[in-house]
Amino acid sequence: MIRDITALGDLLQVEELEKTVWALSDQDVMPLTLIIASKEAGNIWLGAFDGDKLVGFAFGFLGRENGRTMIHSHMLAVRESYQDLDLGYKLKLTQRDRALAMGIRQMTWTFDPLQSKNAHLNFAKLGVVSRTYKTDFYGPETSSLLHRNSTDRLWVEWRLTSKHVQQRLQGKDGRAEVLEVLSRLQPLVQFDGSGEPARTELGAALGRQRICIEIPTDINSVQRKDPELAREWRQATRWAFTEALQAGFFVAEFCRSVRGNQGPGAYVLQKGTVEEFIPEF
């Protein structure tokens, strides 16, 4: 069951869930006083419950971007044993409902672009776009084991009432079209024969209308087995996203599997503006 988090007992469970999911130390966990104050100030706190037990939550606060009031979804967490139930997706949809009820039509958040499952959720299922890459967003690392390979993030925009988003929410993920586009593109970063990231000559790539960037299927597994290889993927994709976005591209799509079920995922970046891709909403 997904509902607003209002009772103190429910809010008390947030800290424990943060620590469990993100493996954070006390210094990086949101203080209970801030949780209570932000809730009372009208920000969005949603919980997924199994009975009285909090098994997932989403927190979004009011902000401003490009002159518009928006919701920034700062954190979403789901217990590992509940992560195959689409709770992250359902929490996002409920966040959307709450934002629209407040008269807000845009949400933003950040995520690690090397996390392919999150990329699939964000681009293929929800319909976000991105034109901003933030290096070391939370600093070089945090106390979380998930943040040892820097904290680079894509800043994504979710245009809640756009036709693009509505099509994604209707299950039209555009995978066939994305695969067709990818079949014609030379990746700016791709796997070489040994599984390492290989970079394409930059000038030729940036002269195209579309480019793509490949990422590993499971960067967490790479990090556990070969931290140095994970760092190579971070450096290569950081270079690719930074150069492409500065050259006038934006991230339009993501396909989780390019070469069969075990293959790499790939982002599609398109030259132009987000406003042309997703008209005024």
Image (cartoon, rainbow, N blue to C red):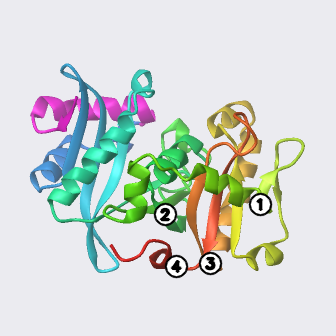
Amino acid under disc 4: Thr
- Quadrant location of the N terminus? top left
Q: Secondary structure at mark 1?
A: loop
Please report whichever mark, 2 or 3, sits nearer to the chain's N-terminal start: 2
Q: Are marks 4 and 2 in contact (CB under 8 Å)?
A: no
Front in this rendered view, residue 140 or 161: 161
Please report whichever mark, 4 or 2, sits nearer to the chain's N-terminal start: 2
Q: CA distance from mark 4 to mark 2?
A: 11 Å
Please report whichever mark, 3 or 1, sits nearer to the chain's N-terminal start: 1
Question: What secondary structure do most residues of the magenta stretch adopt?
Answer: helix
Residue neighbourhood size for the residue with mark 3, other residues' Cα within 10 Å, grouped as few (<14), some (14–19), many (≥20): few
In percent of width and height, residue 196 lies at 82, 46
The part of the chain drawn in magenta is 1-24
Amino acid under disc 1: Pro
Q: CA distance from mark 1 to mark 2?
A: 19 Å
Residue 273: assigned label: 4
* Residue 96 is one of the magenta-drawn residues: no
Front in this rendered view, residue 69 or 180: 180
What residue sits right under mark 1 in the picture?
A: 187
Amino acid under disc 3: Gln
Q: Quadrant of residue 226?
A: top right
Residue neighbourhood size for the residue with mark 1, other residues' Cα within 10 Å, grouped as few (<14), some (14–19), many (≥20): many
Residue 141: assigned label: none
Q: Secondary structure at mark 3?
A: helix
Image height check: is 10 above or below 229? above
- Quadrant location of the C terminus? bottom left
Q: Secondary structure at mark 2?
A: strand
Q: CA distance from mark 3 to mark 4?
A: 12 Å
Please report whichever mark, 4 or 1, sits nearer to the chain's N-terminal start: 1
Residue neighbourhood size for the residue with mark 2, other residues' Cα within 10 Å, grouped as few (<14), some (14–19), many (≥20): many
What residue sits right under mark 3 in the picture?
A: 246
Q: CA distance from mark 3 to mark 1?
A: 17 Å
